[in-house]
Image (cartoon, helix red, strand yellow):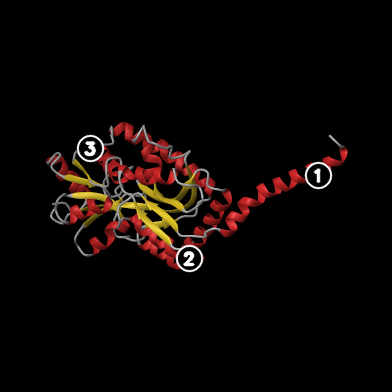
Amino acid sequence: MRPRLIPRLFCTAAVAATAMVSAPRAVAQTYPGKPIHFIVGQTVGGASDLFARMIGQKLYEAWKQPVVVDSRPGAAGSIGAELTARSAPDGYTLLLATAGQLVINQSLYPKLGYDPVKDLAPIAFFASSALMLVTHPSVPAKSVKELIAFARAHSRELNCGSGGNGSPAHLAAELFWAKAGVKMTHVPFKGVAPSVAAVIAGQIDLTFATVAATLQQVKAHRLRALAVTTSTRSRAVPDIPTVAEAGVPGYEMNTWYGLFGPAALPKEIVNKLNAEVTRILGLAEVRERLLNDGADPGNLTLDQFAALIRADAARWATVIKDAGVKAD
């Protein structure tokens, strides 16, 4: 090699390296350049759908690109999660996921077509939420203690709905039955909204569902609220006791919501989305809306969010094993 060619080769290599470093930055600077799709693994009208539309509207106001909410219910949210995991890692197909999709499904579906942890990248933690134990007004129980007494006297006569086998609502019920020492008949639906509608119609007796999905029906006296599942009372319904204080000591259950993308999503796009969602969650109107819907706005870093996912996966694996929960 001639000595005089060496500087030219080094210069070419340096230009190539610079281009490799600057390319992701350029992508992030121009992102988003077209509509973003939020995949929601639950039915329209549930908390995930409501939160996706609220955050999507604020992203549109900031970036002037539409956010399309695409409902893909089924298999406890796995259909929507797998669709996102297999999508192009360009930031235009994202998943508004629940704890059920990301941590429960790992134990519920041993042969998933994707790995919920390895194939999806956390982008932002939205909120955590209590579930509310609600009954049809005709159920002869106006408190958790009365419900337990009735269930013990009428084993398996009460029908308890959920958003599907292994859904957070189902596991909330299994945990309740185990700690209260009662037996009920589980009736799985394809989503939270159909489960709540079935209670309102008197087709089933009770269900566990998010405060956001039940609050207006409780206010209209179409549902009777007995308790919330978190360790402390919900600010949205401060007069409703927790399950623990209402008669089942040690009971605690909540769910959370977060934004995810394909695992190979560039870090620059992850950071841009995280910063904007964090800003949106800090808006007074958004925080008030979340709190009124029974959700606590998120304040976790990406590292803290990843740690929560790992901890919840281990916790719910134990509950699923002990209860013998199986997917359809």
Q: Is residue 287 above or below residue 325?
A: below
The residue wearing badge 2 is 283
Crowd band around label 1 with a 10 angstrom C-alpha radius: few (<14), some (14–19), many (20+) = few
- SS for dot 3: loop
Lower sequence index among marks 3 and 2: 3
Q: Mark 2 or 1 closer to N-term? A: 1
Q: CA distance from mark 3 to mark 2?
A: 44 Å
Q: Secondary structure at mark 2?
A: loop
* Residue 128 in view: no
Q: Quadrant of residue 116?
A: top left
Residue 101 lies left or right of residue 142; in this view the side is right
Q: Could you tell me which secondary element the residue under label 1 belongs to?
A: helix
Residue 8: mark in rendering: 1
Residue 40 image position (x, y, % from top left): 37, 52
Inspect the image, locate mark 2, and give the three-letter code of the amino acid beneath it: Leu
| Residue 163 vs residue 28, the one in the foreground | 28
The earlier-in-sequence mark between 3 and 1 is 1
Decide: is 112 above or below 40: above
> Residue placed at 32% from the left, 58% from the top?
212
Q: CA distance from mark 2 to mark 1?
A: 53 Å
Q: Which mark is residue 124?
A: none
**Residue situated in front as seen by the camera: 49 or 238:** 49
Residue 89's place in the image compared with 64, above or below, is: above
Q: Say whether marks 3 and 1 touch (CB < 8 Å).
A: no
Q: Amino acid at mark 1?
A: Arg
Residue 154 appears at what percent x and percent y?
12, 41
Report whether residue 93 is seen: yes
Looking at the picture, which amino acid does disc 3 mark? Gly
